[in-house]
Image (cartoon, rainbow, N blue to C red):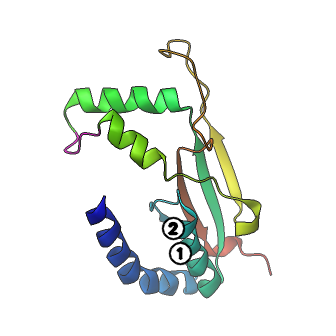
Amino acid sequence: MDDYGRYSARLRAAMGPHIIDILRQGLSIVLDFPANTVRNRNWMRSLIDQSGAAHELHVLDVPDTICRRRLRERNAGGKHPFQVSEEEYDLIASYFAPPEPGEGFNVIIHTVAPAVDVDGPVRPRRNGVSQAGERLKRDRKQP
């Protein structure tokens, strides 16, 4: 987790000015960056504010049971180089905070309904949000 924090901060510092420049040129981009914490979303909000771009914050609302089942399936498939344990999943999930209205995002929520074959009770994650991705679109800015 320490490496992730260090390297993701370096990536944001390197990419931020480039992203702002692209948006100021009127081009649309999609950022596949984590937006699961207020801190990460503040960085994205700064890109929006500096560029003047319109935006959409897409939030995936997936019950915890489905996320865990998908993780077990991914781990069992052996095709992904990073295997996540239940303990690591719990740690990662503990950082998630849903976007609040005061953050100023145009939020679009995508809800995943539980399947009939879900093993165990379906409980939404503590904060109801599994992942968030940010989509910035220059051409949708309202004057």
Mark 2 residue type: Asn
**Considering only vertical position in the picture, is 137 above or below 93?**
below
* Closer to us: 115 or 128: 128
The answer to whether residue 11 is left or right of residue 83 is right
Q: Quadrant of residue 9?
A: bottom left
Left or right: where does residue 142 sit relative to residue 90?
Answer: right
Q: Residues within 10 Å of mark 1 (few under 14, many from 20)?
A: some
In this view, 140 is above or below 65? below
Label count reads 2
Secondary structure of the residue carrying numbered label 2: helix
Q: Nearer the viewer, residue 94 or 136?
A: 94
Q: Which residue: 26% across, 65% down?
A: 3
Residue at screen point 62% across, 27% down: 113
Q: Image height check: is 17 above or below 124?
A: below
Measured from the top left, where is residue 141 in percent x and y? 72, 75
Res. 63 mark: none
Asked which quadrant contains residue 57, the reply is bottom right
Q: Which residue is mark 1?
A: 43
10 Å neighbourhood of mark 2: few (<14), some, or many (≥20)?
Answer: some
Quick check: is 57 in the magenta stretch?
Answer: no
Q: Are marks 2 and 1 in contact (CB under 8 Å)?
A: yes
Quadrant in which the C terminus appears: bottom right
Where residue 1 sits, quadrant-wise, is bottom left
User: x%, y% of residue 75?
Assistant: 26, 32
Q: Which residue is depicted at the point 55% across and 72% down?
A: 44
Amino acid of disc 1: Trp
Residue beneath disc 2: 40
Q: What distance separates the C-alpha of mark 2 from that of mark 1?
A: 5 Å
Which stretch is magenta? 80-84
Instruction: Check disc 1 and report its element: helix, strand or loop.
Output: helix
Residue 117 spot, x, y in % from top left: 50, 12
